[in-house]
Image (cartoon, rainbow, N blue to C red):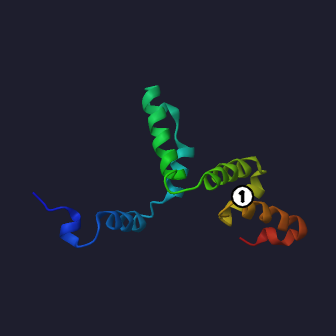
Amino acid sequence: IQAPLEARTGAPARDSRKEILHRLDINPETYHQAFRAWKQWETKEPQALLQQLANLASKWLRPLESSKREICDKILLEQFLYDLDEETQWWVCCHRPGSSTEALQLPLNILRRPSAMRQC
């Protein structure tokens, strides 16, 4: 029987978990992409489907760590990107905006300076 991780490493288990997730490049965006890519036919049972989606959404939106405003902004950003034309959507996503306000500025800059579209 092994001792708890904290006792073996001297570091709190929570910090070790964060470090592992960081090294594996697992972050809220990873879960966001998994949430968007999830196909209902991958799960036969409706209850399991809803449970899986809720799990991915929770890991993406992090309701215990994010404010209501931050969660709403993530959802708003998602819909904004979805509604852009394909070329503009690609260009905005290429710049990885952190908020809906940042995402809005990118196409506005293109309107002011069309040559900016080439920079990605």
Q: Quadrant of residue 108?
A: bottom right
Residue positioned 66% across, 50% down in the render: 78
The residue carrying pointer 1 sits among few (fewer than 14), some (14 to 19) or many (20 or more) residues within 10 Å by Cα, namely: some
User: Which residue does the numbered mark 1 point to in the structure image?
Assistant: 100
17 or 92: nearer the viewer: 17
Mark count = 1
Closer to the camera in the image, 55 or 108? 55
The amino acid on which the numbered mark 1 sits, given as a three-letter code, is Ser
Query: Quadrant of the image for the C terminus?
Result: bottom right
Query: Residue furthest toward the left?
Result: 1
In the rendered image of this protein, does residue 64 appear above or below residue 95?
above
- Residue at 73% across / 55% down in the picture? 89
Image spot of residue 37 (x, y percent): 55, 44
* Coordinates of residue 16 in the picture (x, y in percent): 32, 67
Residue plotted at (45% across, 60% down): 26
In which quadrant will I find the N terminus?
bottom left
Q: Is residue 113 left or right of residue 106?
A: right
Mark 1: which secondary structure?
helix
Looking at the image, residue 83 sits to the left or right of residue 114; the answer is left
In the image, residue 77 sits, relative to residue 98, either above or below, namely: above
